[in-house]
Amino acid sequence: MTTIACRSVIVSFDGVEVLRGVDLDVPSGGWVTVVGPNGAGKSTLLRVVARGLVASGEILLDGCPVQSLSRREVAKLVALVPQEPVIPPGMRVLDYVLLGRTAHLGFFEAEGRSDLEVATSALSDLGAAHLAGRTVDTLSGGERQRVVIARALAQESPVLLLDEPTTALDIGHQQEVLDLVDGLRSERNLTVLATMHDLTLAGQYAELLVMLDAGLVAESGSAAEVLTGEAVSRHYGVRVRVIDDEAGPIVVPVRRTT
Amino acid sequence: MNPRHAGPARLRGWWLASGGLAVLVAGIAGLVLGPADLGFGEVLVELVDRLPLVDVDSGLGERQQAIIWEIRLPRVVLGLLVGAMLATAGGAYQGVFRNPLADPYLLGVAAGAGFGATMAIVSGAGDGVGILDPVPLSAFAGALVAVTLTYLVGATGGRLDPVTSLVLSGVAVASFFTAVQTFVQQRESETIRQVYFFVLGQLRTAGWNDVTLLAPYTGVCLAVILMVRRRLDALGVGDEEAGSLGLDVRRMRLITVVAASLGTAAAVSVSGLIGFVGIIVPHTVRLLFGTSYRVILPLTVLFGGAFLVLADVVARLAVQPAEIPIGVVTAFLGAPFFVLVLRTARRAR
């Protein structure tokens, strides 16, 4: 069963088409990662799925056109971990994670005991329970990323959208965060749609890779199918060596010698 | 872990109690202090005497009792209502525009009310009383016209983001109304004093009529703002993220702005254009009690009311027997505070 389906999605800013007719299927319980050079439209695609942008074409969440759903209904289906989350100054971690409960509360309603339980269990699932009383703006990059993911988990949506979840992290924390997400995916039966820059990591975690270039799907398939030296050179304009490893293809940039 | 930090942000009992105490102290000061010399003890006894089933004699004469019940008490209650409304509207604006320097006059309420009041005054209609007094009615209408205009112009902002376009259209509309008001005021110089008093704000003419006129607006608007305070926290992560959390940002902003503007319009139509309360009070509360609007707004209601009542006491005692406009007092205290807020905001960055 498909959780997210995009059909001929077109988005333009100021008359320039950023997405030029993208088709994408994310199967329920799967992990799909979108890769591609800067400006290829990766983040735009995620924002469209989260209804942060209006697009032409068809976007179906659980079979329903996204435009026919209210904001609350969308938020109950997909939770977005933004690339650069806005951190309100002075807000404490627990309060920040509780914001994830917004879609479950009536307009004038406040959180109850059960919302608090959801938030604290999201924090402990990410090994961040000890951070609850800190303010978000004092956390390190790795801690902050876990807290933002905890907020998304508190939404209790079946789909997790991760926009470059590892870009701000060192390699140890990159692996840690992706392992956590993968563990949660099987534990909570989540569907993951991510964008990533690191091709090697992208290939190691995703079941399906989709490479965007200039607003179109250029390649899609398994890591071995998409991450070929030829494809990466063509779409990124870079010289790379791809090493086949049992964990997946390892993409290494090679300096141009002229 | 420190147990104080274990739970989510919420109002603590003693915070509310301290707000209540501030209201009580300000209220008693407002009843006891004034040109007519009434003893502290006598005023208290007189208050107790009015409680049901209590009968004690304060020893105050009929005239002195009337000063308490017909002059000072309505003035205190009016100060509480206006102060609470202006301060809370300021706090709500700061949240909804994510701008610490937003005040309730941001969208043109003050300029519109000033224009409306000036029109009523120069047309010689300013002599009625209570519900029939055309000055507050005209000020109220002017304020609502100005804010509505701001909203309509701001909604057509095109390429700008909605917050910026709304704030800029507020600046434009306010300048326009101020220009027209100043022009009319210059042409009709014999009423300039009356207009001047409105612009600086005063609780002087307060009677129970003003209170009963204002109370329903204040009550409803404050209640609405307090009910959306959790959503104001969610808005802190920006429009798009708040939308992805399931918040209907446009509706939320509209509801908050309508409640804050309507309440402010009602308050200034009775009290005149008292400045700075909407910035001083929410920021002081924020510095003292934390950054969550769930905490800030209820406390701002209490401290805002108390602050204005105290400012009014200063206004009528500072240069006796004359009375300085209350807007002068709030601004005199507010301007240095404004600088302080600017300085701490810069340091935090």
Image (tube, helix red, strand yellow):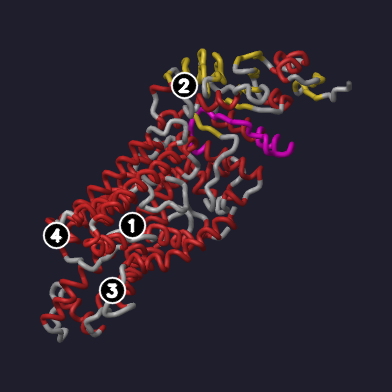
Marked residue nearer the N-terminal end (1 or 3): 1
Q: Pinpoint the chain carrying mark 4.
A: B
Marks 1, 4: nearer the viewer: 4
User: How many angstroms separate mark 2 from mark 4 (CA)?
Assistant: 58 Å
What is the magenta range? A153-178
Question: Any mark on residue B130, and which?
Answer: 4
Q: Pinpoint the chain carrying mark 1.
A: B
Marks 3, 4: nearer the viewer: 3
Q: Amino acid at mark 4?
A: Gly
Q: Amino acid at mark 3?
A: Glu
Classify 10 Å Cα crowding around label 3: few (below 14), some (14-19), many (20 and above).
Answer: some
Classify 10 Å Cα crowding around label 1: few (below 14), some (14-19), many (20 and above).
Answer: many
Q: Is residue B28 left or right of residue A35?
A: left
Q: Is residue A109 visible?
A: yes
Q: Amino acid at mark 1?
A: Leu
Q: Which residue is mark 2?
A: A61
In the rendered image, residue A185, in percent from the top left (x then y), is placed at: 58, 29
Q: Which residue is mark 1?
A: B86
Marks 1, 2: nearer the viewer: 1
Marked residue nearer the N-terminal end (3 or 4): 4
In the displayed structure, A33 sits above or below A90; it is above
Q: Which residue is mark 3?
A: B323
